[in-house]
Amino acid sequence: MTAASTTPSASSSSTPSPLTGPLLCAASMICVQSGAALSTEVMNVLGAPGTTWLRLCFAAFFLVLISRPKFHLYSKAQWKAAIMLGVAMAAMSLCYFEALMRIPLGLATSIDFLGPLAVAVAGMNRARHLIWPLLAAIGVLMLVHNGAGWTVDLVGAGFALGAAVGWASYIILSKRVGSVFSGLQGLAMSFMVAAIASLPFGIGGVVAGATPFYLLAVAALAVLVPLLPYALEMTALRRMSTRAFGVLMSAEPAIGALCGLALLGQQLSWLQYAGILCVTAASIGAVAEK
């Protein structure tokens, strides 16, 4: 769930190895999903909102140092774009990490992926394109219901769905920010807004449980997600087409399931793994159609 996953880029004039882009995409997805998994211990102490708020604060701090935004020179349109994107980022992050406190990583990521899938499907106008949202819906049903009853916490699934709405909004709004800001300044501004917007939800958990160790842990997690994935994805986009990039990034729900299993011992049922494959296939199909 990073900015670069939705930002188009001009192709590079150089001719790097054809494996460079895919490897960078894989590294980015592993960073995102392992960072989410490794956040579990911190969230148990600071809470999901507290961890999210601190992560956004550190990410904003690092990006401001890098981009040095010129606050006094920005227009009303720039401030409006940054504020809207920042609010979407805060909602997306808060909902996603609340979901992780209740349901397995692979499930949360798969449901969250409905956001970019919805954006990809929105521009399609042929009847056969309906197969992709239908396949995704079947996949989500497999994730949360086994035919006899609900298999996951519905509140957690609801938070994941809220994160999907936030991610869809984020994709649309990030394009607007990219058009009115140069470099990383728009992203830095949006992270600042996201940190401010999430403060009322996260400050209580931080005040109650923060120690130097946990502050350092969240700072490291902020580098793992979202700063490092953003850099990796931006570099990948300079070496491959946005369509190929989108197809590769569709593997993220499956990587989330593997990270959940390897790092958190979250074993899923065969039906849930099939559901993840359906969501992944729907995402690949929707991107390939565009």
Image (cartoon, rainbow, N blue to C red):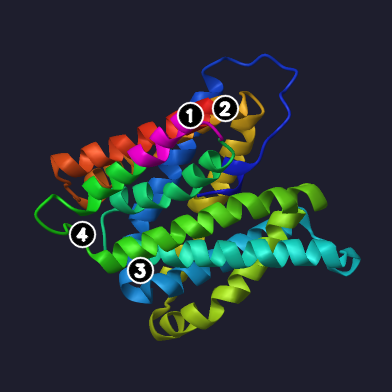
| Mark positioned earlier in the residue sequence (4 or 1) | 4
| Mark positioned earlier in the residue sequence (4 or 2) | 4
From this view, report whether residue 193 is shown above or below residue 170. below
Quarter occupied by residue 197: bottom right
Residue type (three-letter) at the residue carrying disc 1: Val
Q: Are marks 2 and 1 in contact (CB under 8 Å)?
A: yes
Cα–Cα span, label 4 and label 3? 20 Å
Instruction: Check the image and name the residue furthest to the left.
Output: 148
Query: Circle 1 sits on which residue?
Result: 247
Query: Circle 4 sits on which residue?
Result: 152
Residue type (three-letter) at the residue carrying disc 2: Arg
Kindly identify the residue that appears in the image at 66 percent across and 67 percent down: 192
Bounds of the magenta segment = 125-135
Cα–Cα span, label 2 and label 1? 6 Å
| Mark positioned earlier in the residue sequence (4 or 3) | 3
SS for dot 1 = helix
Kindly identify the residue that appears in the image at 54 percent across and 25 percent down: 244
Q: Does residue 46 appear in this view?
A: yes
Residue type (three-letter) at the residue carrying disc 4: Val
Instruction: Say whether residue 27 is left or right of residue 64.
Output: left
Q: Are marks 1 and 3 in contact (CB under 8 Å)?
A: no
Instruction: Say whether residue 69 is left or right of residue 246.
Output: right
Across and down, in percent, residue 24 comes to 52, 31
Query: Circle 2 sits on which residue?
Result: 243
SS for dot 3 = helix
Tell me the crowding category of disc 3: few under 14, some 14 to 19, or many 20 or more residues within 10 angstroms, Cα based.
many
Query: Circle 3 sits on which residue?
Result: 43
